[in-house]
Amino acid sequence: MLFARLGLWELVRRDWARAFQLRSPESSWKWLLLALIHLDAGDTDAYGRLCADMRKRFSGGDDPVVALDLVRACMALPDPKADPREMAELAGMVATTHPEVPWVHYVAGLAAYRAGHDERAVELFRRSREAGLSWPAREINLPLLALAYHRQGKAADAEQALAEADEVRDGWLTAMFDGVDDTGWAIHQNAEPRWPISWCDWFEFVANRCQAHLTLRGAAPTDDARLTVLRARGLAGLRLRRDADALYSAALSALPDDPRILLESHRNRGYIQAEAGQWHDAAEEFAAASELRPDDVRLWSFVVSARLAAGELEAYRQGCREMFRRFQATTDSAVAHQLVSACTIGADALPEMAPLIPLGRLAASRGLGNARLWGAACYRAGRFEDARLCFEEAARLVRPTAWLWCFLALTHERQGRHDEARRCLAEAEAWVDAADHRTGDDVSEDGPSWNGMGNRIDNVTLLREVRSLVDGRP
């Protein structure tokens, strides 16, 4: 169901069609959804075959929900694949026995409309809206109500219903587009659409609204670039970043100055360049994103990390100085975490490193193992014994990564424990090698793995510093 939650319906269609071949599901709802997905993709042949199989499978049962799913699937086309009169009779019987359920009246109205009973359809659509004040999808009645009015010759009523449908659709889409939690974008890439109505309701509303536009206004409704962005977010969330980039480019061709689309596009391209090892270009993309969202500390962290990975030491240090000026007064442990992490992966990031120590202490309060950041601030400030104690405490609480092994190696070397420093260096190199050779098929949480853009940069950058200090290697 992940692809469905992300709105990547072409992937849902591919996977579900294969699943249906292997085993037909018991749930009529899944049959209905796949039928609507086939229609959305324009594959009326696959839709017709599925509806025929669905009638064989579910006709004659006594479950009202199954009966209504069958009606909805078979009546989805303007030219139905089943007898509309039979479907209208079936849905009408359910509506009679369940007068309090608004979506039952909607389905009965759909069947009545397909059967040409326009007056009855209008009555049922109105009843559905009136009974469904608490039903989030009550307005899916509007496009069909517009079509029924049109066939009755009530042009003004039809146009009003369609205008209301357009307004509702814009509100739903705005809520999906804007209603994202940007604080966790580095994890989910904004791939968390909050669907205002069920997927089946959405597909029916979109298809019927399109039909209403064609019938009343002679043309399909214009495409909305925000839908393209929602798909781009889904692909980015799956780490299919180049596919996402193509969709962001398409959205920007329609809305070239939209700040949110520009922000997400730059972030996505930053990841693409980082994954290709093009660190300068990655830094430029993340910097462009940071200009659009200057208070996002993670973007600042990505910029300076990429500068350091590109070997642009002065740009790295300048970025750290600017980052420190902007965020030094924070009381947020998450912000302190990003600030201290970014300013300690390279030596001499700031003219004076001691002011990072209280921020490291704040970052350490964030959770188990975060004493390592306090230790990193102490190490860069030359307080090696305090650093060692922090790193060893962190190592007792969490499984060490290459980052922690590297700082332990640096600290031991500074304190004259050369053999221990070399042992920690070997551990760090083994960790990096294991993470580099981890396959994409390994989804377990055990063992070394790269987690996010900055993780690999920080570990590999520190490893170079350790090799130079401990072994004199470049």
Image: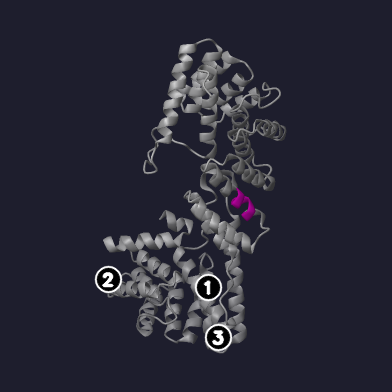
Q: Which residue is mark 3?
A: 150
Query: Which dot, 2 or 1, sits closer to the camera?
Result: 2
Dots 2 and 1: beta carbons under 8 Å? no
Could you say which disc has been placed on residue 57 in the image? Answer: 2
Q: Position of residue 66 (x, y in %)?
A: 34, 69
The magenta span reads 261-266
Residue at the (34%, 63%) spot, across then down: 17
Regarding residue 182, the answer to whether it shows in the image is yes
Q: Residues within 10 Å of mark 2 (few under 14, many from 20)?
A: some
Query: Which dot, 1 or 3, sits closer to the camera?
Result: 3
Residue at the (44%, 87%) spot, across then down: 116
Q: Residues within 10 Å of mark 3 (few under 14, many from 20)?
A: some
Which amino acid, by three-letter code, is at mark 3?
A: His
Spatial separation of the CA atoms under disc 2 and disc 3: 35 Å
Q: Position of residue 112 (x, y in %)?
A: 43, 82
Labels in figure, total:
3
Q: Position of residue 103 (x, y in %)?
A: 45, 70
Label 2 vs 1, first from the N-terminus: 2
Could you say which disc has been placed on residue 129 in the image? Answer: 1
Label 2 vs 3, first from the N-terminus: 2
Query: Taking 33 as reference, is 379 left or right?
Result: right
Q: Position of residue 458 (x, y in %)?
A: 54, 31
Residue at the (49%, 73%) spot, across then down: 207
Is 371 in the magenta?
no
Is 265 in the magenta?
yes
